């Protein structure tokens, strides 16, 4: 994985820097057996604590025993100043600066690095080193510390980006599943309802009026082919719909089922997303009228109101609230089912709202409002 590769690369670079400082220090302080042994012990402690701190930092964690590991590294860094000559901490404070920048808030870490530079500059200025050597060691503190901090942040940002990419991929898969589920429910619901109605009607007419029964079977076949086409369009993710075309099909379907329909549409040019949302509302509303109501009349109207277009699909055959209705039909007064929920989602994508409610004397109205001026953002 990308994050694992970045972590290995950063770990290798930090280890290389730590080893480089260790080798320089050992060469510098190996002036005798005692100094050599002390230098080896000190650097083993410094490098070990630095390794533990950086390994946890590269994983976005804190080391076991934190903050004792940071305190131990600081003690191992400055204690040799009292045991070895020449200010040994000048060679190890850059590693400590990196640890502080990784684990402390930047404002506190920056102040700590400034104090380290001041301490090392003062210590070396009064030592045997010349001015440019002192300046070198002082400047090494923030530069090395910043490099270590940048490597750790690079690794963590890479891991976070990889995780975000995986989450976005999961979200895209879920969104596509929801789209297919919603489109199949909204699109096939009307077609399957029409097929069932045509089949029942043909079955009743087959004995007493074979000609009409054959016509209904032919119409049933046509609707079935449309349903198959809908499935293919859902699979391809393309659902080009128009409000006028959907209203025309709804009028023809409901009138063939014995429902008187009146349609009054405002002459308005709509953004694609808004028009498709209204078309889906008509399809869902007609499906509910045919499947769940005892309607004899139905009206489909649109009206323009201050930059929004309002669609109302009303009928006079809402079922009794006490009767059983299919969950998700949009007629139940409890939580909205998948049909109405899908319309609410589509309306929101078009910058509008959707809802349904009972009216007086057994009526029911499905309403949706969408933006007209500009297409809503995705």
Image (cartoon, rainbow, N blue to C red):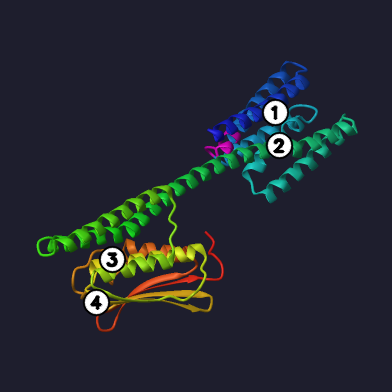
Image disc number at residue 329:
3
Q: Earlier in the sequence, mark 2 or mark 1?
A: 1
Spatial distance from mark 2 to mark 4, Cα to Cα? Answer: 78 Å
**Front-lying residue, 207 or 300:** 207
> Which secondary structure, mark 3?
loop
Q: Is residue 239 left or right of residue 321?
A: right
Circles 2 and 1, Cβ within 8 Å, touching? The answer is yes
Query: Which residue is labeled 1 in the image?
Result: 17
Disc number lying in front (4 or 3)? 4
Bounds of the magenta span? 54-65
Spatial distance from mark 1 to mark 4, Cα to Cα? Answer: 84 Å
Q: Earlier in the sequence, mark 1 or mark 4?
A: 1
Query: Which residue is labeled 2 in the image?
Result: 147
Circles 2 and 4, Cβ within 8 Å, touching? The answer is no
Q: Earlier in the sequence, mark 2 or mark 3?
A: 2
Compared to residue 163, the image places residue 330 above or below, namely below
């Amino acid at each position: 994985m990308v994050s694992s590769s970045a972590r290995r690369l950063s770990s290798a670079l930090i280890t290389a820097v730590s080893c480089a400082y260790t080798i320089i220090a050992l060469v510098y302080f190996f002036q005798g057996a005692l100094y050599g042994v002390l230098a080896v012990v000190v650097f083993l402690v410094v490098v070990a604590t630095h390794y533990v701190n950086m390994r946890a930092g590269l994983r976005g964690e804190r080391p076991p025993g934190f903050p004792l590991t940071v305190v131990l590294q600081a003690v191992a860094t400055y204690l040799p100043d009292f045991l070895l000559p020449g200010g040994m901490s000048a060679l190890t404070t850059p590693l400590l600066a990196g640890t502080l920048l990784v684990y402390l808030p930047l404002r506190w870490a920056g102040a700590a690095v400034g104090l380290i530079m001041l301490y090392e500059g003062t210590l070396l200025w009064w030592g045997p080193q010349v001015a440019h050597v002192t300046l070198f060691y002082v400047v090494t503190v923030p530069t090395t510390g910043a490099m270590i901090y940048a490597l750790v942040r690079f690794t963590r940002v890479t891991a976070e980006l990889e995780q975000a990419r995986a989450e976005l991929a999961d979200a895209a898969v879920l969104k596509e599943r929801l789209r297919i589920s919603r489109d199949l429910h909204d699109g096939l619901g009307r077609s399957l309802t029409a097929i069932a109605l045509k089949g029942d009607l043909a079955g009743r007419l087959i004995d007493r009026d074979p000609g009409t029964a054959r016509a209904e079977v032919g119409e049933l076949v046509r609707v079935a082919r449309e349903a198959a086409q809908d499935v293919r369009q859902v699979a391809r993710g393309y659902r080009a719909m128009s409000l006028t075309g959907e209203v025309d099909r709804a009028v023809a379907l409901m009138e063939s089922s014995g429902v008187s329909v009146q349609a009054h549409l405002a002459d308005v040019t709509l953004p694609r997303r808004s028009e498709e949302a209204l078309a889906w509302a008509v399809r869902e509303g007609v499906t509910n009228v045919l499947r769940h109501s005892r309607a004899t009349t139905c009206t489909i109207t649109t009206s323009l109101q201050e930059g929004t277009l309002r669609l109302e699909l009303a009928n006079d055959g809402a079922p009794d609230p006490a009767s059983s209705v299919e969950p998700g039909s949009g007629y139940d007064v409890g939580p909205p089912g998948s049909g109405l929920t899908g319309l609410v989602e589509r309306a929101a994508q078009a910058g509008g709202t959707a809802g349904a409610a009972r009216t007086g004397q057994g009526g029911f109205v499905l309403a949706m409002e969408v933006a007209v001026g500009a297409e809503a953002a995705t």
